[in-house]
Amino acid sequence: MALLITEKCINCDMCDPECPNDAITFGAEIYEIDPDKCTECVGHYEKPTCQSVCPITNCIIIDPERRETNDELLEKFVTLQGLA
Ligand code: SF4
Ligand code: SF4
């Protein structure tokens, strides 16, 4: 599953520099996650680091439109690393 930043975002910029896949950028009004780059931190960390650093509860959620298995996320990680 890719993650999704909701309208609760206060643009604090804590998550952007922590993403190992450079998936987070500042969008039109709030920060956004590129679902093609988000591996839910699979391949890097045990849990999503953006969720860990975000100071707002339930601000970053699982994107219901982008449900992926762990194997699919690992495959995405390998592709992003240029190892595929
Ligand atoms: S879950 Fe990990 S890869 Fe996805 S946006 Fe957050 S920090 Fe980046
Ligand atoms: S850490 Fe949370 S509140 Fe801060 S910019 Fe990222 S999503 Fe928004």
Image (cartoon, rainbow, N blue to C red):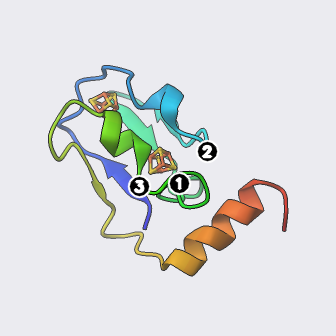
Q: Position of residue 42 (x, y in %)?
A: 54, 61
Q: Amino acid at mark 2?
A: Asn
Q: Earlier in the sequence, mark 3 or mark 2?
A: 2
**Cα gap from disc 2 to disc 1, whole angstroms:** 7 Å
Q: Tag 1: Cα neighbours inside 10 Å, few (<14), some, or many (≥20)?
A: many
**Cα gap from disc 3 to disc 1, whole angstroms:** 12 Å
**Cα gap from disc 3 to disc 2, whole angstroms:** 14 Å
Q: Amino acid at mark 3?
A: Lys
Q: Is residue 56 above or below residue 21?
A: above
Q: Secondary structure at mark 1?
A: loop
Query: What residue would you read off at disc 3?
Result: 47
Q: Is residue 30 above or below residue 32?
A: above
Q: Where, quadrant-wise, is the C terminus in this rendering? A: bottom right
Q: Nearer the viewer, mark 3 or mark 2?
A: 3
Residue at the top extreme of this rendering: 12
Tag of residue 38: 1
Circles 2 and 1: CB atoms closer than 8 Å: yes
Which residue corresponds to the image point at 23% horizontal and 24% vertical from the top-left?
A: 10
Tag of residue 21: 2
Side of 72 relative to 69 (left or right): right
Side of 58 relative to 84 (left or right): left
> Where is ligand 2, by quadrant?
top left
- Tally of numbered tags: 3
The residue at label 1 has a CB less than 8 Å from ligand 1? yes
Q: Tag 3: Cα neighbours inside 10 Å, few (<14), some, or many (≥20)?
A: few
